[in-house]
Image: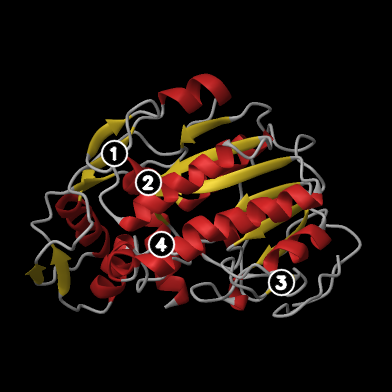
Amino acid sequence: MDVKGPGARAHGTRPAQFAVARAADGYDAPMEVPTSMPGRLPARVLVTGGAGFIGSHLVAALRKAGREVVVFDDLSSGSVANLPSDVPLVQMDVADPAIVPLIADAAPGLVIHAAAQVSVPRSMADPDRDRAVNLIGTQHVLEGARMAGAKRFVFISSGGAVYGEASNADEGDAPAPASYYGLHKYAAEGYVRLSAMSHGIVRLPNIYGPRQRSDLEGGVVAIFIESLLASRPITMFGDGAQVRDFLHVEDAVAGILTVAAAGADGTWNVATGRATSINELLAHLQRLVGVHVAVQRAPARAGDVRNSSLAIRRIVADLGWMPRYELGEGLAQTLAEGRRSG
């Protein structure tokens, strides 16, 4: 899978086949792959944002299922260290139109578009950059996928940002984005629906798990664990009563790949269906770590919603997917990984 062009950089070489995911560069592949997936996905998959938190877990699961994977990532938030050394990597911003022919040249059968500008505050401060990445970038990836003749396109959207203030939000609820990030994600969904490609749109909640960075948007679990392990004070935006739906990254990957393997077009929440307040999350982690630290309160940030939880009735009924991790189990696993890596 040779991909060449301005701004492209090959990382590693392409092996003859990807029969089994291997631990490489200190990276451990997820243990679970949806049982319905093997045989129902194309052999070659392109993942944008594949060096990032969610994307790199997707890459590992796809390789474990025997798929050949190529990654497109500008490495603004992802890292080469998240990928096995033999996974081809093209370093390029999705906002750059030069990415279109490079995607076409990669000839994927499936494109999973996970690359994004994910910071709500940054979207409010610089809406033009957010639009360039999250809307125009999605157009570029769609066009490249069409030119490649891809059989299916999966778009990773944001449930919390698209629905806005919502409790137990259903896919049929009217979107009410409270930030430019949510607005551009919702607009990008429209481009996917109008693309005439076979597609699945995945609306995710707050994702947590191993390899999440504490300095990026949505990384509250990583932030809390890092601070507790170092016995440092925690800054909490707002009063902590705001609620979120916290989904383990392995469950997110399983849901995304279930949507990718589906034959139907549609939009699905991939979540737990449970609401947890930030105060409850912190108390749970303090019990697990055995440490209590000072909490410094700060004003709520512009664009942040107070209540965000997602219903999962549709994906359970349509595709038979359900999350595997309870929050306590997922937090304990993430904490154990943080202690090992720290």
Q: Which residue is mark 4?
A: 118
Q: Which mark is residue 143?
A: none
* Visible residue check, residue 65: no
Label 3 vs 2, first from the N-terminus: 3
Q: Are the two marked residues, 1 and 3, in contact with CB atoms closer than 8 angstroms?
A: no
The residue under the point 64% across, 73% down is 92
Read off the residue under disc 3: 89
Q: Are marks 1 and 2 in contact (CB under 8 Å)?
A: yes
Q: Nearer the viewer, residue 188 or 211?
A: 188
Tag 4 and tag 1, C-beta contact below 8 Å: no
Query: In the picture provided, is 341 more to the left or to the right than 71?
Result: left
Q: Nearer the viewer, mark 4 or mark 2?
A: 4
Say which label, 1 or 2, has the lower sequence index: 2
In the image, what residue type sits under mark 1? Ser
Q: Look at mark 2 in the image and give the residue it sits on.
A: 205
Tell me the mark number nearer the camera, choosing from 4 and 1.
4
In space, the residues marked 4 and 2 are separated at their CA atoms by 12 Å
Residue 309 is marked as 1
Q: CA distance from mark 4 to mark 3?
A: 21 Å
- For disc 2, the neighbor class at 10 Å (few under 14, some 14 to 19, many from 20) is many
Residue 71 in the image: state x and y as whole percent. 69, 65
Rendered residue at 88%/58% (across/down): 17
**Looking at the rendering, which quadrant does residue 96 occupy?**
bottom right
95 relative to 225 in the view: left or right:
right
Q: Kindly report the distance in space between the C-alpha atoms of the residues bearing marks 1 and 3.
A: 34 Å
Tell which circle, 4 or 3, labels the residue nearer the N-terminal end. 3
